[in-house]
Image (tube, rainbow, N blue to C red):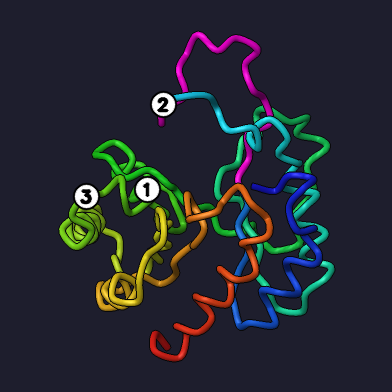
Amino acid sequence: MNTPTDIAPDVLARELEARGYESLWMGEHSHIPASRRTPYPAGGEMPAPYKSMMDPYLSLLLAARASEHLLVGTGVALPLEHDLFALAKPLQQPHPPVLCGTGGRVGTREAVAWADGWMPMDIALGDVGRKVARFREIASDAGRDPGAIPITMVTFGDPDLATLARYRELGVDRVVLGSARTGWDDPVTTLPCLDTYAAMMPELA
């Protein structure tokens, strides 16, 4: 969750790179409403870590400086909630890839229209295979090469090896792990989680 009680971003980056991970993604929830009239979507009270998430750009800067090849990205970016002049100017030109993370009908249309890649969450897609095929069909109908639009699948919970292998067979280019995983709010579980999925990498290569 990128909070002060989590593993420091630079330490996490080194741990990821040492295990062969390709990238590090951080979300952003910079403004939490003072009123709780709108219920938390999952029910109950909003988890405490949401109230102390750090600036992802600063955290990813630390991670990038601590690693040699690790790619970094924001899983959620809310630039309008920042002073835009305070945001770092990207060194990657013309700009870092911009991924669209929505999976519904409108989101798919938007992703095909302007995004450099598609980044849906698997649980929101339902039948992942059918939705991936449909996305590629829409891209082709719009005149884009479906193979030129990388798919980054955000996994929900604790995907097993068979699920990850299925995504690979569907042509998914990357999976992002950690969203709502078991123990997500306990930093002690982070490195064991990394070890679990690092052990699967040889079978998914």
Residue 127 in which image quadrant: bottom left
Dot 1 corresponds to which residue?
111
Within-10-Å neighbours for mark 1: few <14, some 14–19, many 20+: many
Within-10-Å neighbours for mark 2: few <14, some 14–19, many 20+: few
Nearest to N terminus: mark 1 or mark 2:
2
Q: In this view of the protein, which residue sits in the foreground, 149 or 170?
A: 170
Q: Amino acid at mark 2?
A: Gly
Nearest to N terminus: mark 3 or mark 1:
1
Residue at 68% in and 60% down: 188
Residue at 49% in and 62% down: 177
**Mark 3 and mark 1: span between their CA atoms?**
18 Å
- Confirm whether the magenta stretch covers residue 30: yes
Position of residue 97 relative to residue 4, above or below, is below
Residue 204 placement (x, y as % from top left) = 39, 85
Residue 93 placement (x, y as % from top left) = 68, 62
Q: Main secondary structure of the magenta part?
A: loop
Which of the labelled discs sits on residue 126, or is there none?
3
Dot 2 corresponds to which residue?
43
Within-10-Å neighbours for mark 3: few <14, some 14–19, many 20+: few
Secondary structure under badge 1? helix
Q: Which of labels 3 and 2 is toward the front?
A: 2
Residue at 77% in and 63% down: 63
Secondary structure under badge 3? loop
**Mark 3 and mark 2: span between their CA atoms?**
21 Å
